[in-house]
Image (cartoon, rainbow, N blue to C red):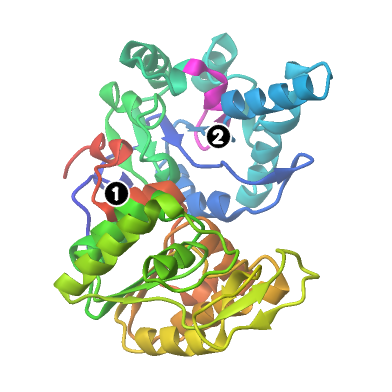
């Protein structure tokens, strides 16, 4: 199954300089990469490009959101009466040099680093690249123009980035839903094509889930809030044969049906919306499946004493933190005949052993489905599948939480739309 956009296979790169947007926005702790899934996902495209006898490859990425995170840190320091050292904060959290070093070890060859993505140093290092050499630019989000709402700001930055190279490759699916200078605007100035990761994401999410899902199609939507998943829920009602709802958002649906939810997290302002979704599903003949029992506790803690409810009601000051054994059995039965599964959001607090059984049980079931297309749609679902050691048993693990949801919602992603059509 192919996509409508050109990829690195569709363009001659020999003798050309390539600038490539990757998504190396990986979790860091004390300057050490904690999860290299996104870095490894970009390696096939990078190695392919380097095999094309190019005159250098320039990589650019963001790491976190310096502006937003910096404001939070600034506010916290002010509240505690402390002086905020912005330079030290930025150096400690958002600089890409440690990621570049880690990537170099994975690639097995030296990777040069520019201390800024714009300016004389970056331009000089890009111009000096020789065959097979790689340059990593500093965090694109250190420049406000990257994410500016003003198109002229983005164009100025994109034009400078484009001056480094002859061809632009976008393999950063995780940021494809953003119209940023390095993800979308740069395509105005260079031939723009998709990398292999971008291609794979579009094949699975757009073609195998949105456009041509094999039936029966079962979607699992979990997480905390109905409000954050409303658009994808409504979109899936038009496509899925069955919709399994778990996580805290399930309690909003249960309360909307008049079922007691105790002290569980509920969005009371979304009760009417939940009722409307249930009614719409009924009118379309799509089944909505909610938990029929729960793992409950008085507090969300690894040491909390957990109990299992006898039915779908939760009483008193108890709070639901996972689905119970009867719910696991019900959901597994729904999944057993599925030929397409899309999963976004865990069905419990899987980070804690006492509330992880439901999420891991569903992961095990999905991993064991024969002849089914199983797509894990980013974010915490990916973390859960990785923690369960089942990532290699799934058809596709998406690297983009927000981007995968927007694609399934039916939205056009700016970073994809900007690429050349075949």
Q: Secondary structure at mark 1?
A: helix
Whole-percent x, y for residue 47 in the image: 48, 49
x 47%, y 83%: residue: 292
Q: Is residue 115 left or right of residue 261?
A: right
Rounded to the nearest whole Å, what is the CA distance between mark 1 and mark 2?
A: 20 Å
Viewer-proximal residue among 421 and 231:
231
**Vertical arrangement, residue 174 with respect to residue 167, above or below:** below
x 76%, y 39%: residue: 31
Question: Which mark is nearer the camera, 1 or 2?
Answer: 1
* Label at residue 133: 2
x 84%, y 19%: residue: 82
Q: Would you say residue 131 sits in the magenta stretch?
A: yes
The tag earlier along the polypeptide, 1 or 2, is 1
Q: Would you say residue 275 sits in the magenta stretch?
A: no
CB atoms of marks 1 and 2 within 8 Å = no
Q: Which residue is mark 1?
A: 9
x 43%, y 67%: residue: 255
Whole-percent x, y for residue 177 in the image: 36, 40
Quadrant of the rendering where the C terminus is positioned: top left
Q: Note whether residue 196 is visible.
A: no
Image: magenta residue range: 130-144
Q: Is residue 240 left or right of residue 226?
A: left
């Amino acid at each position: 199954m192919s996509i409508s956009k050109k990829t690195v296979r569709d363009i001659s790169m020999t003798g050309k300089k390539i600038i490539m947007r990757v998504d190396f926005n990986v979790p860091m702790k004390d300057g050490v990469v904690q999860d290299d899934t996104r870095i490894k996902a970009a390696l096939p495209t990078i190695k392919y490009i380097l095999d094309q006898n190019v005159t250098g490859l320039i990589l650019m990425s963001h790491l976190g959101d310096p502006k937003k995170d910096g404001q939070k840190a600034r506010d916290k320091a002010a509240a505690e009466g402390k002086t905020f050292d912005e330079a030290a904060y930025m150096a400690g959290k958002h600089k890409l040099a440690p990621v570049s070093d880690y990537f170099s070890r994975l690639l097995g060859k030296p990777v040069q680093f520019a201390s800024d993505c714009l300016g004389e140093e970056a331009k000089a290092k890009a111009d000096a690249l020789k065959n097979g050499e790689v340059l990593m630019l500093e965090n694109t989000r250190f420049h406000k123009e990257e994410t500016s709402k003003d198109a002229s700001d983005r164009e100025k930055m994109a034009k400078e980035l484009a001056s480094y190279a002859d061809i632009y490759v976008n393999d950063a699916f995780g940021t494809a839903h953003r119209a940023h200078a390095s993800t979308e605007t740069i395509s105005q100035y260079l031939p723009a094509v998709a990398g292999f990761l971008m291609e794979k994401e579009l094949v699975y999410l757009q073609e195998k889930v949105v456009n041509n899902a094999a039936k029966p199609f079962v979607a699992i939507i979990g997480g905390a809030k109905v409000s954050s998943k409303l658009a994808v829920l409504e979109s899936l009602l038009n496509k899925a044969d069955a919709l399994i709802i778990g996580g805290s958002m399930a309690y909003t649906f249960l309360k909307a049906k008049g079922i007691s939810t105790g002290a569980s997290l509920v969005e009371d302002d979304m009760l009417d919306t939940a009722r409307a979704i249930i009614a719409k599903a009924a009118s379309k003949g799509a089944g909505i499946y909610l938990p029929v029992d729960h793992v409950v506790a008085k507090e969300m803690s690894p040491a909390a004493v957990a109990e299992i409810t006898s039915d779908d009601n939760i009483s008193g000051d108890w709070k639901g933190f996972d689905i119970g054994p009867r719910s696991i059995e019900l959901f597994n039965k729904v999944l057993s005949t599925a030929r397409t599964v899309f999963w976004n959001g865990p069905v419990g607090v899987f980070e804690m052993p006492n509330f992880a059984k439901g999420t891991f049980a569903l992961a095990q079931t999905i991993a064991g489905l024969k002849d089914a297309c199983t797509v894990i749609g980013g974010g915490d679902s990916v973390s859960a599948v990785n923690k369960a050691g089942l990532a290699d048993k799934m058809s596709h693990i998406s690297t983009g939480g927000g981007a995968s949801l927007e694609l399934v919602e039916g939205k056009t992603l700016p970073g994809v739309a900007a690429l050349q059509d075949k």
